[in-house]
Image: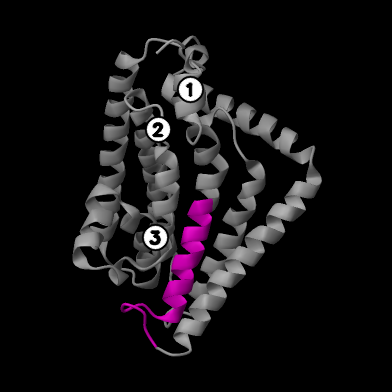
Amino acid sequence: MKLLKLFATSFSLSLRQALAFRANLVFDAVLSVVALASTIATVLVIFSRTGRLAGWTQPEVLVLIGTFELLSGVKTTFVDPNLAGFPTRGVREGRLDHHLLQPAPSMFLVSFATAAPLAGVQILLGLAVVLAGAGTLAHYPGAGAFGAWTVLVLAATVTTWAVGMIFASLAFWAPKLDLHSLFGNVWQLARYPADLYARPLRRLFTYVLPLAVIASAPARTLARPGDPALLLGALAMMATTVLVANAVWRAGLRRYTGASS
Protein backbone atom coordinates (compact mmCIF):
# COMPACT_ATOMS: atom_id res chain seq x y z
CA MET A 1 0.00 0.00 0.00
CA LYS A 2 2.90 2.33 0.71
CA LEU A 3 4.26 1.82 -2.80
CA LEU A 4 0.80 2.32 -4.31
CA LYS A 5 0.42 5.62 -2.46
CA LEU A 6 3.88 6.65 -3.62
CA PHE A 7 2.98 5.76 -7.22
CA ALA A 8 -0.31 7.70 -6.97
CA THR A 9 1.47 10.76 -5.59
CA SER A 10 4.10 10.67 -8.32
CA PHE A 11 1.48 10.29 -11.05
CA SER A 12 -0.61 13.10 -9.56
CA LEU A 13 2.37 15.47 -9.63
CA SER A 14 3.14 14.51 -13.23
CA LEU A 15 -0.50 15.05 -14.21
CA ARG A 16 -0.59 18.51 -12.65
CA GLN A 17 2.58 19.48 -14.46
CA ALA A 18 1.22 18.17 -17.76
CA LEU A 19 -2.10 20.00 -17.40
CA ALA A 20 -0.23 23.27 -17.00
CA PHE A 21 0.27 23.04 -20.78
CA ARG A 22 -3.23 22.06 -21.89
CA ALA A 23 -2.57 22.78 -25.54
CA ASN A 24 -0.23 19.79 -25.48
CA LEU A 25 -3.16 17.56 -24.54
CA VAL A 26 -5.05 18.52 -27.71
CA PHE A 27 -1.92 18.24 -29.82
CA ASP A 28 -1.01 14.80 -28.43
CA ALA A 29 -4.58 13.58 -28.88
CA VAL A 30 -4.66 14.70 -32.51
CA LEU A 31 -1.31 13.05 -33.24
CA SER A 32 -2.45 9.81 -31.61
CA VAL A 33 -5.68 9.77 -33.62
CA VAL A 34 -3.87 10.49 -36.90
CA ALA A 35 -1.24 7.80 -36.27
CA LEU A 36 -3.86 5.21 -35.34
CA ALA A 37 -6.08 6.16 -38.28
CA SER A 38 -3.17 5.73 -40.70
CA THR A 39 -2.43 2.27 -39.29
CA ILE A 40 -6.08 1.20 -39.59
CA ALA A 41 -6.25 2.63 -43.12
CA THR A 42 -3.22 0.54 -44.10
CA VAL A 43 -4.91 -2.57 -42.71
CA LEU A 44 -8.11 -1.84 -44.63
CA VAL A 45 -6.11 -1.44 -47.85
CA ILE A 46 -4.38 -4.79 -47.26
CA PHE A 47 -7.67 -6.57 -46.60
CA SER A 48 -9.25 -5.04 -49.67
CA ARG A 49 -6.99 -7.42 -51.61
CA THR A 50 -6.92 -10.47 -49.32
CA GLY A 51 -9.17 -12.18 -46.82
CA ARG A 52 -6.45 -13.16 -44.34
CA LEU A 53 -3.04 -11.93 -43.25
CA ALA A 54 -0.86 -14.78 -41.96
CA GLY A 55 -4.07 -16.55 -40.96
CA TRP A 56 -5.59 -13.50 -39.23
CA THR A 57 -8.89 -12.00 -40.38
CA GLN A 58 -9.51 -8.26 -40.56
CA PRO A 59 -11.44 -8.07 -37.23
CA GLU A 60 -8.68 -10.07 -35.54
CA VAL A 61 -6.01 -7.71 -36.85
CA LEU A 62 -8.06 -4.74 -35.61
CA VAL A 63 -8.14 -6.30 -32.14
CA LEU A 64 -4.37 -6.76 -32.41
CA ILE A 65 -3.84 -3.13 -33.44
CA GLY A 66 -6.03 -1.91 -30.59
CA THR A 67 -4.18 -4.07 -28.09
CA PHE A 68 -0.83 -2.85 -29.37
CA GLU A 69 -2.00 0.77 -29.20
CA LEU A 70 -3.18 0.29 -25.62
CA LEU A 71 0.11 -1.28 -24.55
CA SER A 72 2.07 1.40 -26.42
CA GLY A 73 0.13 3.97 -24.41
CA VAL A 74 1.12 2.26 -21.17
CA LYS A 75 4.76 2.08 -22.32
CA THR A 76 4.83 5.75 -23.36
CA THR A 77 3.06 6.87 -20.18
CA PHE A 78 5.06 4.97 -17.57
CA VAL A 79 8.06 3.06 -18.95
CA ASP A 80 9.72 5.47 -21.37
CA PRO A 81 9.75 8.62 -19.17
CA ASN A 82 11.67 6.74 -16.47
CA LEU A 83 13.84 4.15 -18.19
CA ALA A 84 14.73 5.80 -21.51
CA GLY A 85 17.05 8.32 -19.87
CA PHE A 86 18.35 6.11 -17.08
CA PRO A 87 21.82 5.49 -18.59
CA THR A 88 22.43 9.25 -18.75
CA ARG A 89 20.55 10.55 -15.72
CA GLY A 90 20.87 7.60 -13.42
CA VAL A 91 24.33 6.22 -14.12
CA ARG A 92 26.47 8.83 -15.89
CA GLU A 93 25.11 11.80 -13.93
CA GLY A 94 24.79 9.80 -10.72
CA ARG A 95 21.16 10.63 -9.94
CA LEU A 96 20.64 7.05 -8.87
CA ASP A 97 22.39 8.09 -5.64
CA HIS A 98 19.24 9.97 -4.62
CA HIS A 99 17.03 6.91 -5.10
CA LEU A 100 19.40 4.66 -3.17
CA LEU A 101 19.08 6.93 -0.14
CA GLN A 102 15.28 6.82 -0.09
CA PRO A 103 13.27 4.45 2.18
CA ALA A 104 11.77 2.60 -0.78
CA PRO A 105 13.05 0.00 -3.27
CA SER A 106 15.40 1.71 -5.71
CA MET A 107 14.07 -0.40 -8.58
CA PHE A 108 10.56 0.93 -7.91
CA LEU A 109 11.72 4.55 -7.64
CA VAL A 110 13.69 4.35 -10.87
CA SER A 111 10.70 2.80 -12.67
CA PHE A 112 7.92 5.12 -11.46
CA ALA A 113 9.51 8.41 -10.41
CA THR A 114 7.61 10.27 -13.11
CA ALA A 115 5.07 9.74 -15.90
CA ALA A 116 3.75 11.23 -19.14
CA PRO A 117 0.00 11.30 -18.40
CA LEU A 118 -1.01 12.91 -21.72
CA ALA A 119 0.18 9.80 -23.53
CA GLY A 120 -2.67 7.98 -21.78
CA VAL A 121 -4.85 9.07 -24.71
CA GLN A 122 -3.34 6.13 -26.59
CA ILE A 123 -4.70 3.75 -23.95
CA LEU A 124 -8.26 4.97 -24.48
CA LEU A 125 -7.94 4.89 -28.27
CA GLY A 126 -6.53 1.38 -28.16
CA LEU A 127 -9.36 0.16 -25.96
CA ALA A 128 -11.90 1.70 -28.34
CA VAL A 129 -10.35 -0.11 -31.32
CA VAL A 130 -10.29 -3.42 -29.40
CA LEU A 131 -14.00 -3.11 -28.63
CA ALA A 132 -14.79 -2.11 -32.22
CA GLY A 133 -12.78 -5.02 -33.60
CA ALA A 134 -14.34 -7.47 -31.13
CA GLY A 135 -17.78 -6.34 -32.27
CA THR A 136 -17.04 -7.45 -35.82
CA LEU A 137 -15.60 -10.87 -34.96
CA ALA A 138 -17.45 -13.91 -36.26
CA HIS A 139 -18.41 -14.77 -32.66
CA TYR A 140 -18.56 -11.95 -30.12
CA PRO A 141 -16.24 -12.84 -27.21
CA GLY A 142 -17.83 -13.74 -23.91
CA ALA A 143 -16.90 -12.57 -20.42
CA GLY A 144 -14.32 -15.37 -20.10
CA ALA A 145 -12.52 -14.27 -23.27
CA PHE A 146 -12.45 -10.64 -22.15
CA GLY A 147 -11.22 -11.77 -18.73
CA ALA A 148 -8.38 -13.77 -20.32
CA TRP A 149 -7.56 -10.81 -22.57
CA THR A 150 -7.36 -8.54 -19.51
CA VAL A 151 -5.03 -10.95 -17.70
CA LEU A 152 -2.79 -11.21 -20.76
CA VAL A 153 -2.71 -7.42 -21.21
CA LEU A 154 -1.63 -7.06 -17.58
CA ALA A 155 1.00 -9.77 -18.11
CA ALA A 156 2.18 -7.99 -21.27
CA THR A 157 2.39 -4.71 -19.35
CA VAL A 158 4.60 -6.26 -16.68
CA THR A 159 6.69 -8.01 -19.35
CA THR A 160 7.16 -4.71 -21.19
CA TRP A 161 8.33 -3.01 -18.00
CA ALA A 162 10.67 -5.92 -17.17
CA VAL A 163 12.28 -5.90 -20.63
CA GLY A 164 12.69 -2.13 -20.40
CA MET A 165 14.30 -2.54 -16.98
CA ILE A 166 16.71 -5.15 -18.33
CA PHE A 167 17.82 -2.79 -21.12
CA ALA A 168 18.12 0.09 -18.65
CA SER A 169 20.12 -2.01 -16.19
CA LEU A 170 22.68 -2.86 -18.85
CA ALA A 171 23.78 0.78 -18.49
CA PHE A 172 25.75 -0.29 -15.43
CA TRP A 173 28.08 -2.12 -17.84
CA ALA A 174 27.71 0.10 -20.93
CA PRO A 175 26.44 3.56 -19.86
CA LYS A 176 27.07 5.14 -23.26
CA LEU A 177 24.89 2.70 -25.19
CA ASP A 178 21.31 3.85 -25.86
CA LEU A 179 19.73 0.41 -25.64
CA HIS A 180 16.26 1.73 -24.82
CA SER A 181 16.05 3.34 -28.26
CA LEU A 182 16.80 -0.08 -29.73
CA PHE A 183 13.97 -1.50 -27.63
CA GLY A 184 11.65 1.25 -28.86
CA ASN A 185 12.44 0.53 -32.51
CA VAL A 186 12.08 -3.23 -32.17
CA TRP A 187 8.87 -2.70 -30.17
CA GLN A 188 7.09 -1.55 -33.34
CA LEU A 189 7.30 -5.10 -34.68
CA ALA A 190 4.75 -6.16 -32.06
CA ARG A 191 1.97 -4.36 -33.96
CA TYR A 192 1.95 -7.16 -36.56
CA PRO A 193 0.73 -10.76 -36.13
CA ALA A 194 3.51 -12.96 -34.79
CA ASP A 195 2.58 -15.55 -37.44
CA LEU A 196 3.72 -13.08 -40.11
CA TYR A 197 7.39 -13.66 -39.30
CA ALA A 198 9.55 -16.59 -40.33
CA ARG A 199 10.02 -19.31 -37.72
CA PRO A 200 13.52 -18.18 -36.57
CA LEU A 201 12.30 -14.62 -36.02
CA ARG A 202 9.10 -15.88 -34.38
CA ARG A 203 11.16 -17.89 -31.90
CA LEU A 204 13.41 -14.89 -31.27
CA PHE A 205 10.38 -12.67 -30.59
CA THR A 206 8.87 -15.30 -28.32
CA TYR A 207 11.71 -16.63 -26.18
CA VAL A 208 14.44 -13.95 -26.32
CA LEU A 209 12.68 -10.63 -26.88
CA PRO A 210 9.05 -11.54 -26.15
CA LEU A 211 7.33 -9.22 -28.62
CA ALA A 212 5.05 -12.04 -29.79
CA VAL A 213 3.67 -12.25 -26.25
CA ILE A 214 3.11 -8.51 -25.97
CA ALA A 215 0.15 -7.89 -28.29
CA SER A 216 -0.42 -11.03 -30.37
CA ALA A 217 -1.16 -13.26 -27.37
CA PRO A 218 -3.93 -11.05 -25.86
CA ALA A 219 -5.44 -10.43 -29.30
CA ARG A 220 -5.41 -14.13 -30.15
CA THR A 221 -7.06 -15.16 -26.88
CA LEU A 222 -9.85 -12.62 -27.46
CA ALA A 223 -10.38 -13.57 -31.10
CA ARG A 224 -9.90 -17.32 -30.61
CA PRO A 225 -10.68 -18.16 -26.97
CA GLY A 226 -10.13 -21.54 -25.39
CA ASP A 227 -6.34 -21.93 -25.40
CA PRO A 228 -5.12 -22.20 -21.78
CA ALA A 229 -1.56 -22.91 -22.97
CA LEU A 230 -1.40 -19.37 -24.37
CA LEU A 231 -2.40 -17.89 -21.02
CA LEU A 232 0.03 -20.06 -19.06
CA GLY A 233 2.86 -19.34 -21.50
CA ALA A 234 2.35 -15.57 -21.22
CA LEU A 235 2.29 -15.73 -17.41
CA ALA A 236 5.43 -17.86 -17.40
CA MET A 237 7.16 -15.36 -19.70
CA MET A 238 6.12 -12.52 -17.41
CA ALA A 239 7.53 -14.28 -14.35
CA THR A 240 10.77 -15.10 -16.18
CA THR A 241 11.38 -11.54 -17.40
CA VAL A 242 10.66 -10.11 -13.95
CA LEU A 243 13.14 -12.50 -12.33
CA VAL A 244 15.78 -11.71 -14.95
CA ALA A 245 15.19 -7.96 -14.58
CA ASN A 246 15.55 -8.19 -10.81
CA ALA A 247 18.74 -10.25 -11.10
CA VAL A 248 20.33 -7.91 -13.67
CA TRP A 249 19.38 -4.84 -11.59
CA ARG A 250 20.93 -6.29 -8.42
CA ALA A 251 24.08 -7.30 -10.29
CA GLY A 252 24.30 -3.80 -11.75
CA LEU A 253 23.93 -2.16 -8.35
CA ARG A 254 26.96 -4.11 -7.15
CA ARG A 255 28.97 -2.45 -9.91
CA TYR A 256 27.63 1.04 -9.27
CA THR A 257 29.93 3.30 -7.25
CA GLY A 258 28.10 6.61 -7.42
CA ALA A 259 28.30 9.71 -9.57
CA SER A 260 31.97 9.10 -10.31
CA SER A 261 31.35 5.61 -11.82
Residue 135, position as x, y percentages in the image? 52, 76
Q: Which mark is residue 229?
A: none
Write down the region rendered in magenta: 51-72
Query: Can I make out residue 145 in this image?
Result: yes
Q: Secondary structure at mark 1?
A: helix
Residue 140, position as x, y percentages in the image? 46, 76
Residue furthest toward the bottom?
Answer: 49
Residue type for callout 3: Leu
Residue type for callout 2: Ala
Among the two numbered marks 3 and 2 on one chain, the one whose residue lies closer to the N terminus: 2
Identify the residue at horizontal 28%, vertical 21% (top origin): 251
Assign the magenta stretch its main secondary structure: helix
Identify the residue at horizontal 49%, vertical 77% (top origin): 43
233 over 50 or under it: above or below? above
- Coloring applied to the structure: one colour
Q: Could you say which quadrant of the image residue 228 lies in?
A: bottom left
Among the two numbered marks 1 and 3 on one chain, the one whose residue lies closer to the N terminus: 1
Residue 99 in the figure: left or right of residue 38? left
Q: Secondary structure at mark 3?
A: helix
Residue linked to disc 3: 189
Residue linked to disc 1: 90
Identify the residue at horizontal 32%, vertical 58% (top origin): 212
Q: Secondary structure at mark 2?
A: helix
Q: Are marks 1 and 3 in contact (CB under 8 Å)?
A: no
Query: In the image, is residue 53 part of the stretch drawn in magenta?
Result: yes
Q: Residues within 10 Å of mark 3 (few under 14, many from 20)?
A: some
Distance in Å between CA atoms under marks 1 and 3: 28 Å
